[in-house]
Image: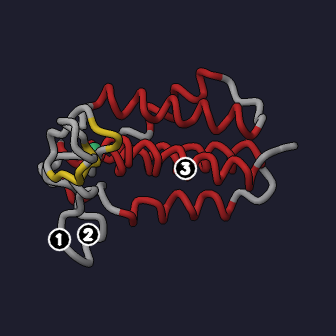
Amino acid sequence: MDTLYHFIFALIGGYVFVKATRYEIKFRVLVLLALISEFPDLSHLAGDLSLLHNIFVFIPLLGIYIHQRRKENTKIYVVILMLMVYGHLLSDMIFGMGIPLFYPLSDKMYLLPQIGLCMYDSTLPKIMYGPDLVECFFTTHGLALALYFGVIGGLSVCLSRR
Ligand SMILES: [Zn+2]
């Protein structure tokens, strides 16, 4: 996925999370976190997508989260950043070659199911396969949105300040 898509995806996700949880976080901080969440794509500079496109990138972020017991703002920034990075990895699994989710344990590339529920004629909707499905009830793109905002919604309920 391209850099602008990642940025907008992250920013919207962060904004929704902040509004849902009622944390008072400035928009410019969200912009900064959305920019930082692009860091997996630094692995392209090294010529190896695997380096930062795997679930183990969350380990240092979890470490920061765990060691910030007293600074609530830092903790919530890390949660937002993790959500944004999750969105980054998820969107890189919508199409293309996918990402090596469990690298360095495995080189296997993971892609969201290239599937859709589509109706192109007057018959019943059919399950169809492929990356270029359009005019469907759902496709991989919708699935990615549901997975992203589903997690954001779930975390918002758990971490809400109400
Ligand atoms: Zn990426």
- Measured in 3D between alpha carbons, the distance from the residue under mark 3 to the one under mark 2, in whole angstroms, is 25 Å
Q: Is residue 42 visible?
A: no
Name the residue: 18% across, 36% down: 120
Label placed on residue 103: 2
Q: Is residue 150 left or right of residue 161?
A: left
Amino acid under disc 3? Gly
Judged by depth in the image, the label closer to the viewer, 1 or 3, is 3
Label 1 beta carbon within 8 A of ligand 1: no
Q: Is residue 110 visible?
A: yes
Residue at image mark 1: 107
Relative vertical location of residue 116 with respect to residue 59 in this rendering, above or below: above
Amino acid under disc 1? Asp
Between 21 and 59, the one nearer to me in the picture? 21
Residue at image mark 3: 150
> Residue 161 placed where, x, y %?
83, 44
- Measured in 3D between alpha carbons, the distance from the residue under mark 1 to the one under mark 2, in whole angstroms, is 6 Å
Where, quadrant-wise, is the C terminus in this rendering?
A: top right
Q: Dot 1, crowdedness within 10 Å: few (<14), some or many (≥20)?
A: few
Q: Are marks 1 and 2 in contact (CB under 8 Å)?
A: yes
Name the residue: 29% across, 48% down: 117
Label placed on residue 118: none
Amino acid under disc 2? Tyr
Name of the residue lying farthest toward the front: 122
Name the residue: 24% across, 38% down: 1
| Disc on the earlier residue, 3 or 2 | 2
> Residue 16 placed where, x, y %?
61, 33
